[in-house]
Amino acid sequence: MGTQKSIVLVTVDCLRADHVGFMGYDRPTTPFLDSLAGESFVFPAAIVAGAPTYYSFPAILASRYPLALGRDVLGLGPDEPALASVLKQAGYATASFGAANPYLSSRFGYEKGFDTFRDFLEDEREPTSHEKANALASNRWASRLKRKLHKVGAGLGPMGILYDELYFEYCQRVTPVADSLDALRRFPAADVVVHRACTWLSSIGDAPFFLWLHLMDPHTPYYPREAALELLGHEPVTPYRARYLNSYWNRSDLGPRRFARHRDEVIALYDAGIRWGDAQMAQLVETLRGLSLWNNCIFAFTADHGEEFLDHGGRYHPPSRLMEELIRVPLLLRVPGSVKQEVTKSPFSMLHLAPTLLDAAQLSAPKSFQGRSYWEQLRQGESFDGLAISECVAGCTNPYRPENRIGPRVLSVRESRFKLILHFDPAAEDLYDLEADPGEQAPLATTAQNAVRRRLLEIAREHLSRSIEGRDWRTRVQVRLRELRLEWKNPADKASPVAS
Ligand SMILES: [Zn+2]
């Protein structure tokens, strides 16, 4: 075996930092990773550069702010160096296995540099007649529900709520349901993805390799493997109940108080998704050990963004606010041959992950990377005073429509203690003191901490002017062409928001 270290990068969609054991969660979602944490760097405040998926990954894989090339550039630029292309050039075998997130497909440039790129999207099959009937029935009850509720709900006060709950449950009952959670799941479960990865690992001999896995188990709709609930020590959830919870959670006509009554049950399904990912990590590492690859393998486990569970009234992970539950993710980094050190509490922007990984493998980062390596500080256990900027386009929940991408920007600047969130339309700035108010319950008064406010605003201003300088028309036109080519080939998927 060569001395060049291999790299495994695992990203889990929608995994918020406070739902893994090694970040202090009290439910046993990640026993395997917790055991690995004993020999790994664990980052107390890893912050994504944007959310959701499409505003996060340019930083993770190409160390670049998501809006730096312009809002109309989604994904990686056509000539943009990224981890895979750099490592391939350095002689690595490269492979990616991703659980069918459409925003991480070749349409957005993510296949570049990978010898093997499986995104499982081609596995999408025609719906069966049972599923078609299901969808039809659920559309029918939805409009029936709406009409009925409109008529009776409003005038009934608390009785109206009861009526609504009963009627919703009735509609769920008359819709045919699948016989297992597996039949309801939209994305391949982690075991499917990891199995493919292990097969690939067995085929590459002793070349250094880069493996990127993207798991979707905690992503909505929340249909975990039944075995995962059991591993979590949770009672079984019937397909009927799971579908009821997902449909309820997806309603657009309710306020937070009504959602709150099912919140814990929904979270249990989400947590089971995390638990399944953890079990598959154990499988992956066992395979790496069996192939004698583990001792020479850098292992990074992280997420593209978090998930909201009514923390601030919201659900899922829309690009609207950049609160901690959305931008703070777990980051565990195991580098063989180094001694575990405590990582400073300062924010670590995911912009720095790719250069840090390359440095830990003794490779240098391309000039286009906007982040820098923190490997020396980590290795020496030195504290660093970091800063993390996150950005997204407000309301862009379907970037398949280019007109959806040009809304106002939301920007946050986060230090260890203070965090400034800027909304551009309508203009607003909220300053939070995360030490006094870690849950971001209330922004500070507009007159408080003026020096801090000024400092963070100045950082935001510099960031914005850099990102305007960085735009180049050639890249934007090339990206637009890439997308158009695919739309011509496949006109049906222009308007299909599937995941994020
Ligand atoms: Zn995502």
Image (cartoon, rainbow, N blue to C red):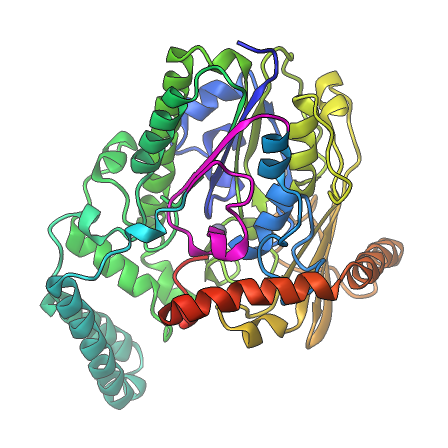
Q: Which residue is located at x 62 percent, y 66 percent?
A: 393
User: Total label count?
Assistant: 0
Point out the stretch of residues depicted in magenta.
Answer: 90-117
Q: Quadrant of residue 496?
A: bottom left
Residue at x 64%, y 29% (from the top left corner): 357
Expressed as whole percent of the image width and height from the top left, the position of residue 133 reads 13, 69
| Vertical arrangement, residue 156 with respect to residue 358, above or below | below
Magenta stretch contains residue 103: yes
User: Which residue appears at 27% of the width and 49% of the height?
Assistant: 223
Horizontal relation, residue 287 to residue 399: left or right = left
Say which of 353 and 383 sits in front: 353
Q: Nearer the viewer, residue 457 or 63?
A: 63
Instruction: Find residue 165 and report its horizontal and vertical position in percent.
Output: 23, 70
Regarding residue 162, the answer to whether it shows in the image is yes
The residue lying toward the viewer, choosing from 354 and 43, is: 354
Quarter-wise, where is residue 290 in the image?
Answer: top left
Residue 180: image x %, image y %?
A: 15, 48
Q: Is residue 57 above or below residue 384?
A: below
Task: Return the residue nearer the eye: 367 or 50.
Answer: 367
Q: Is residue 21 left or right of residue 425?
A: left
Indicate whether 356 appears above or below 426.
Answer: above
Q: Residue at x 52, y 65 (%)?
A: 483
Q: Is residue 73 magenta?
A: no
